[in-house]
Amino acid sequence: MATDDSGVSTPISSSSTLTSKSPLLEKQSMQPYALTASNVIEFISSRSATSSTLFVYDLAEQAGFGLLSKEWSKSDQGATSVIPLQTRSGAGLSLVGRLSQGTSKDAVSGSVLTVYNTPTGLVEMVPSLAYAPSPTANSRLILQVPTVSVIGDRLTLSPTLASLNPVLPVIPESFVVLLSATPQESVDIAALAYKFPAHVIHLFNHHGSSREVSQLQVPSISSKEVGSTVRSVLQQSGYHSFDYMGDRNAHTVIVVLNGPLALALGATLANTPHVGVLVVRVLRPWDEELFQDVLPPTVKHIHIIEDAPFEASRGLLHANVRGSVLDFPGPIPDIHHQPVTPTRLSDLLGKPRFLTQFLSNLPSFPADVKSHDVSTAAKLIFFSTPGTPLSSVPQRIEQTFAQSPRVSVRLLTEHDVLSRPGAIAADRIWLEPRNDSVPHTPLSVGLPISNDSAGVCNFLAIFDQTLLKSHSLLKHAKFGASILVVTSWSASELVSGLAEEDISLIRDRELHLYIIDANLVASQLGPGGVTQNSLQGLIVHLAFLRLYLGPRASEAGILKLTENLYGASMGGVSIPTVITRVWDGLAEVDLSGATAEPGDKLERKDFEFNAIVATAEDGNTVVNGARLGSWHDAARHLLFPYAFTKQDIRGPSTEQYPQIPALHPESPDRTYLVTCTVNRRLTPREYDRNVFHVEFDTAGTGLEYAIGEALAVHGWNDEAEVLDFCNWYGVDPARLITIPVPGDDTKVHTRTVFQALQQQIDLFGKPPKSFYSDLAEYAKSCVDRHTLLFIGSPEGISTFKKLSEKDTVTFADVLRRHPTARPGIEVLCGLIGDIKPRHYSIASAQSAVGDRVDLLVVTVDWLTPSGTPRYGQCTRYLAELKIGQKVTVSIKPSVMKLPAENTQPLIMAGLGTGAAPFRAFLQHRALLATQGVPLGPVYYYFGSRHQSREYLYGEEIEAFIQDGIITKAGLAFSRDGPKKVYIQHKMLDDVEALVRMLHEEQGVFYLCGPTWPVPDVYETLVKAFEMHCGMDATAADAFLERLKGEERYVLEVY
């Protein structure tokens, strides 16, 4: 719908037009409305001139599509009647009955019935469509299908068509199946649907493009003329069954259904030679002759990419394409099929590197993929709390730029109602020169909000200071971007509250951080109440313009930009006065010398799109079809609680190597299922230290890691100990229990007691002091209750320390010591909490080993004073891994990074398993050497007790020395001689070379291993600079501190 300057909703006139070209529209006067395609589709479909009756299914309304049509039917004389329907088995039979011959009024008088439903709902309707009567000019069925579905246990939204894949082949031939992608195309095809001589299913991207606010032209819908054929109707409109993009002499062609992935592929491969993208707009009826005409005669390889629920699925697109090339003139090209599961589609659309990697992994695909350049676009992201005075600021900013005839502006709003009470909104704005030749890039591709963002936007705004604590947001700002935080905190308070990773990110990317207290400025300008709330929005809008326009942001220029929206004043306050106060209130934050406050590291969340929001005429917020009195109710109304389960009954999984959300739903990190292929002990069997080497196969998982990163292993508890505990506790290990997902009381997951205690609950971990107090509530014995209360009290600190540090008791031990304290198993799981993943430095370089990740691990075990054996939970799990066993892992960043230049010297000092990252360094350096890359010197220091027993990777190290990869090795085996020798002693032999490399050649020093040698190593380096650089101890200490700041003195110790 359109809005006037007051923000009040207004109906869309059928003659309304906007500023981008449409092949359907005759020349008419332009009206500057900014609309969403979905709203225009609702307008077209709800007119009595197009539809005799409109049927709105519940799933469509839950997807935010149909609310306007229902409200227009009550207040707009030009709107048709609306009948709400429920999606269930047999859905659609009532529609077929109304079109069938007999006594039906619709069949006798002729009618066009329009239906709104989602892909999931359409699956339930398909069996009924087989009984639909043949279409006539006056009796047809038009299904407008907003493509949005819920995927995975996290209930995120996706444009996937996977649920339709099995049923598309059985849709009757009397139906035309069309797909649209861009906003204008979606509007045009929605109007064309009423001109085809057939029943029609129109699929449009309601997940993204059709919900964008952009400049659209609304086609005329006054004519009821029906065309003779599908091809003729399309041609008259300027559209075709197929679109071809790319090299006209391509050897490789991707065939894909029209939609966001087609747009992403077109943009990514626009400049790649010998590659083309053939986009299918009309899936049925399939025009084989036209397909062959569009396909380049030079094609040798065809890759069919289609949404599918499982990796092995093949759908209607595959069947159509394969049948069309059998009599292709010339050599028949090879056919390759690439199913895209819902989770993979989200990655391909939301994570740019995934799409490039996906293409590079296609068989016989050219290696030189050249992404489309969208550098002319300005990209803005705004995060806010819905329902607050500032939540409408992005819409006002969009309206500001929409006034310019030279700028094309697009706005997309998404909501996350699950990650925090009160929800979080993300508004993306894309600005670029108005140029018809610029291809439409989906905002999810060009401006992704992903959990591994490397920076995508030129400008980032955060309108609620608490979001900095709850969510990881600054990572979306690209290098040199400006960040505006609306906050009541002072600059020093803001800096002291920033997470360490945010401070580092701001420095590394040279971000410019600004703050403004909109509430304070508004209170200084006028009275409280509604006017002050409106003033806050104006203040933040002006602050944005000041920062975005930079030197061009004169007060006169900004006044001219905003006068159409706000006039000359607001609430009696002149706009120039507001501008002056904003200029004074806007401050840049200086982070020089800033450090994060010590304390617990914040576990922050990522934004995930899981809710579509609309506002009803009565002012109520409608989230996923549910009317809410408050945003705090939103998380209780989860999307599609029953409809999406239909997809799961078709198989056990949607990916060959899926994440395991049911196993670790609390984990904010992307998890991977890898396979153990090697588990080899490196130290002798009789030796008292078990150091072992583990290799995991990562093929097909999508796991990628950088050199020096760590692998987080989600280890399991010992099976025998879990079963023994279950027997003692008197609980059936096969019993099903439902456990809340930690950190989100809106989600639960169900599993057996054994699965929970083995795979999730930290039963054999170390209990905190609070556990004793919590457990005391369930003790039936006075002795147990008072003992537990005492240990948990301040007076019991000595007893607690003895139990924790000396006796190293576990949760299970505490329960056994106090047997009358026996809460129910579900309660117990909540009291104990989850096993935390353990992090291990990766001992391999992916550039050298490919689909593999290696670990170097030492088993942790000890005896308590009472003689009870104890084991490190995860090292024990890893040591007992069998070949072929699956393990859940994730990737964690690390400080251990190679320098920017390969010629910079490396000095590596590792003790025991601290050698792990250096093996990765050396593997990568060896690979570069084979490629003829010039390399700097490498000094390698390694320490352990005995060369014959603990020279870890000794054969590889000797080979690296022999090949010249290691320039000098200092090997310290402390127990092999009469005098103990450590790595710092070996370093003393090379002090002159070390000083030269660090002081003159930009060398980098790394130390990895236990903490104890750090002071001695540091002192050795200080002495080296005193001896060979003429520094005193103070100057040498300052120089080393400078190296730390430059990331050339790097420690990873534990």
Image (spheres, grey):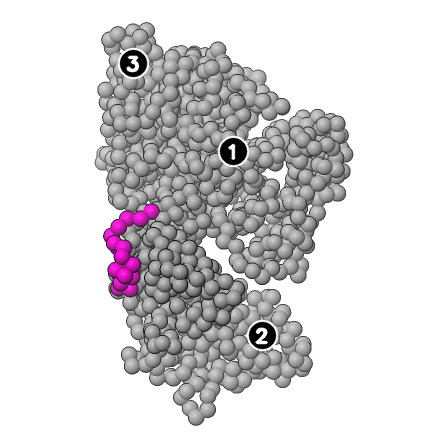
Which residue has dot 3 on it?
98
For marks 3 and 1 on the same chain, the one whose residue lies earlier in the sequence = 3
The amino acid beneath tag 2 is: Leu
Which label sits in the foreground, 2 or 3? 3
Q: Is residue 112 magenta?
A: no
The residue sitting at 37% across, 72% down in the picture is 860
SS category of the residue bearing label 3: helix
Disc 3/disc 1 C-alpha distance (Å): 40 Å
SS category of the residue bearing label 2: helix
Which residue has dot 1 on it?
630
The image shows residue 914 at horizontal and vertical percentages of 44, 72
The amino acid beneath tag 3 is: Arg
Residue placed most toward the observer, 234 or 549 = 549
Q: Which residues are magenta?
A: 720-738
Q: Residue furthest front?
A: 782
The residue sitting at 72% across, 37% down in the picture is 523
The residue sitting at 58% across, 20% down in the picture is 31
Disc 1/disc 2 C-alpha distance (Å): 60 Å
For marks 2 and 3 on the same chain, the one whose residue lies earlier in the sequence = 3
Left or right: 559 as drawn, with respect to 161? right
The residue sitting at 66% across, 38% down in the picture is 540
The amino acid beneath tag 1 is: Ser
Which residue has dot 2 on it?
998
Which label sits in the foreground, 3 or 1? 1
